[in-house]
Each structure stands twice: as structure tokens, then as C-alpha cells.
Amino acid sequence: MDDISVTFVDRGRVQADRNFVVDGTSVATASDHDPDHEYETYVVWNLVIETPNQTILWDTGSHPEAGDGYWPEPLYEAFAHVDAAEHSLSDDLGAVGYGIEDIDAVVMSHLHLDHAGGLYNFAGTDTPIYVHREELPFAYYSAKTDEGSIAYLASDFDHDLNWQIVHGDSYHLADGVELLHLPGHTPGLLGALVDRPSDPLLVVGDEAYVTANYDGQPMATSLLWNNGAWKESLARCQNVQRQTGAEVLLGHDLSVFEALA
């Protein structure tokens, strides 16, 4: 598709122990009861996908008050979005030449707090918010009960939003933009194949936080809703990459993001 472009939007840095991101990175052994831990820096990003008929925003990043008590303390201790206050959605879109008002549609890869924190910008508007059928109920279940996942905040997504529900394994969003259901990290995780001219982009997102995950090393159990589904989704992504030769955009790998952006 000669008329599709992708703009990468840098939404700041998260710091966390690599054990969360690559399972078993640092483990105690009989000879080493206190191994060194790798405390690393990861990226939060969004995309603006331009097609002939619409401007699509991929995800909305963290809430700018993540480090000021908006995120629960245990979650921020584990995954610290250290510069969230400097990365409001409106400012970061402005830095790449867009405004909130330019966005015709939003695709939510999933509704974790580092992806859904900017949805309030679209509350009370007609802007369609695309989310997979399996994600929205699980997000509410998690945020409103003591079960599910702790990474969902009702205050991120419990707004007057124009939800558009994506069903099935694939969804044709626009010419050259195909959404892919990649359950594993969450029940309704979405990726995408964006058919840029001579340079297709496979948006894997949080199916693989970093390159090691894409190579087959899973994230910590706490970051996986279903390990078996994660493996199947990974195989699907790798098959799509082989078939298309697409570049791969991972969920939080800073070096991959910088190379592509």
C-alpha cells in the first residue's frame, strides 16, 4: 500500500527487573544464593498509522500521573514509569505533528495501565475505540474484583467511550491494516500487520516485551494470562514474519524501538 505511513511516538521509559521481562534471568543456586539482578530500562510507545481514509492511533500509553499515586504503589514499584509526567498523550502527539483532534480511531492492543492510561482524552467523543471481544470483559473483571490481573485500572477505561468490538482471529480495520488476535499476555491482546510500501510492519506488541521473548523465552508467569496461548501466538507471529518479511515491533524493547523509529 503506497499510501500507508507509520509514525512512532515515544511515550517515555519504564524501569524494571529483567526477571519480570525474561523469566528466570537471575535465580539463586546452591553456589550463589544472592545473584546480581539486571534492572533495565524499557520503552513505552504509541503509533500513528495514516491511511487514505483515516488516522489511527495505536494505544494511549500511561496516565501522566502514574508516578504521583495514580498507579497503585506495588505496581509502580515493579514497573516504574519514571518520566510519565513528561509524556502526556497530547504533548507527545504534538511532538510528531498531530493533535488529539486529528485521531479518527484508536486501537487498544490491550487495556493494561501502561497502554490505556490516555483513553480519558477520548471520553465523551465519537472516536471509535477498537478492542478485542476477549479483552474488555476481562479488564472489567480484573479491575472490579479481586481476581484476574492487577495490571488493569478501571479509572483508565471506565469512561463514556465509543467501544468497537473486534471478534475472531483477524480483523480488517482498513486497507493494508489487519488486526491479529494474539492471546497469551492477556486474553484479548491485539497485534497488527501494517502493509507499508515495500516495508511491512508486524506489530507484535506485548506478545514479546523484548527480543529474548520473541526468540522463545517467556515473560515471568505474572505477565502471562495463559502460557500455552502465548506460545501459539508467538508461532503465529513468526509465521507471519516469515511469509511477509515484515519488520517486527516488540512491546517494550528500547533498542528495537529506536532502530525502527
Image (cartoon, rainbow, N blue to C red):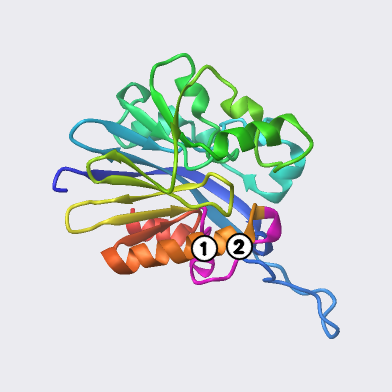
> Where does the image place residue 24, in percent across and percent down from the top left?
69, 70
Which amino acid, mark 1? Glu
Report x, y in % for residue 181.
Answer: 46, 49
Q: Which residue is mark 1?
A: 232
Answer above or below: position of 255 versus 132: below
Residue 245 in view, yes or no: no
**Magenta region's main secondary structure?**
loop
Which contiguous range is marked in magenta?
206-222
Q: Amino acid at mark 2?
A: Gly
Instruction: Tell me: 224 left or right of 12.
Output: right
Q: Secondary structure at mark 1?
A: helix
Residue 208 magenta-drawn?
yes
Q: Identify which residue, 84 or 51, lies in the foreground.
A: 51
Q: Is residue 83 left or right of residue 241?
A: right
- Is the C-beta separation of discs 2 and 1 under 8 Å? yes
Q: Is residue 94 above or below residue 176?
A: above
Is any part of residue 256 visible from this angle? yes
